[in-house]
Amino acid sequence: MAKRTRGSDPLKVLFIGNSFTARNDLPGRVAELAAARGKALQHRLISAGGASLRTHWNAGEALTAVREGGYDAVVLQEQSTLPVKNAGRMHENVRLFDEAITAAGARTVLYMTWARRTVPESQQAITDAYTAIGRELGATVVPVGLAWQHFLREHERPALHDRDQSHPTPAGTYLAACAFLAVLLGENPVGIGSDITGLDESDLTALQQAAWQACRSASEERGKA
């Protein structure tokens, strides 16, 4: 997405997802990081536990919010295992929302999630599913799952997965937020100070670097496609 300069209007973002977005207040964390770089981000979250995008579509609240307009971007987070189990169904769900989002004058942003801790090999299917539909629709993909994968290859701590082996710890959410900062606002998160219980400066730096590197690598790959 295009960068915004200091003093410009806030970036207005609607997040649609489930606990992978709501846990530890991902939208709020992105806004905090943006503020640290002198950028304003206004956000709204429509979330339901375990919900797929089809669940949100059928419920109607998310579609109404999209159609009411006023957003620069709408972030779509699919149920975490659907891209692995049925990528075609996931793509159908994204297409439904993308049509409405585009009609409302906003941009579709896809929140690529991560593999469960016990099945790291499933990240490839998740990555492929989000990349394919993103390319088809010209949507922006935030490669959070790739940032997690990059971090986990190099570091054992801090833990990104919570005790259920699925949901994010505060560190996992922070890593996701750094990726959103890089993609939505084009800002490098490295060097931003944050106050997150249990994370010291070296932890923050490692998370920031993993997000920035993963997002830059993903951008370079898209440029080659």
Image: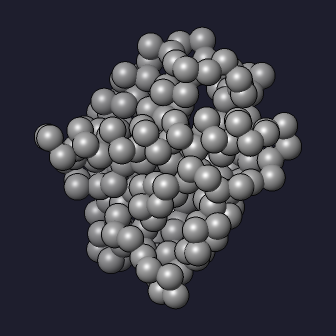
* Tally of numbered discs: 0
Q: Residue at x 23, y 55 (%)?
A: 138
The residue lying toward the viewer, choosing from 197 and 131, is 197
Residue 89, given in percent of the width and then of the height, sits at: 34, 36
The residue lying toward the viewer, choosing from 142 and 189, is 189
Could you tell me if residue 164 is visible in this image?
A: yes
Up/down of 117 relative to 202, above or below = above
Determine which quarter of the picture holds residue 129.
Answer: top left
Up/down of 100 relative to 166, above or below = below
Determine which quarter of the picture holds residue 15.
Answer: bottom right
Residue 225, given in percent of the width and then of the height, sits at: 14, 40
Residue 145, given in percent of the width and then of the height, sits at: 48, 33
Could you tell me if residue 68 is visible in this image?
A: no
Determine which quarter of the picture holds residue 208.
Answer: top right
Q: Residue at x 84, y 37 (%)?
A: 198
Up/down of 70 relative to 220, above or below = below
Residue 2, given in percent of the width and then of the height, sits at: 34, 69
Which color mode does the image show?
one colour
Q: Residue at x 53, y 13 (%)?
A: 119
Quadrant showing the N terminus:
bottom left
Q: Residue at x 53, y 40 (%)?
A: 209
Left or right side of 57 for 92: left
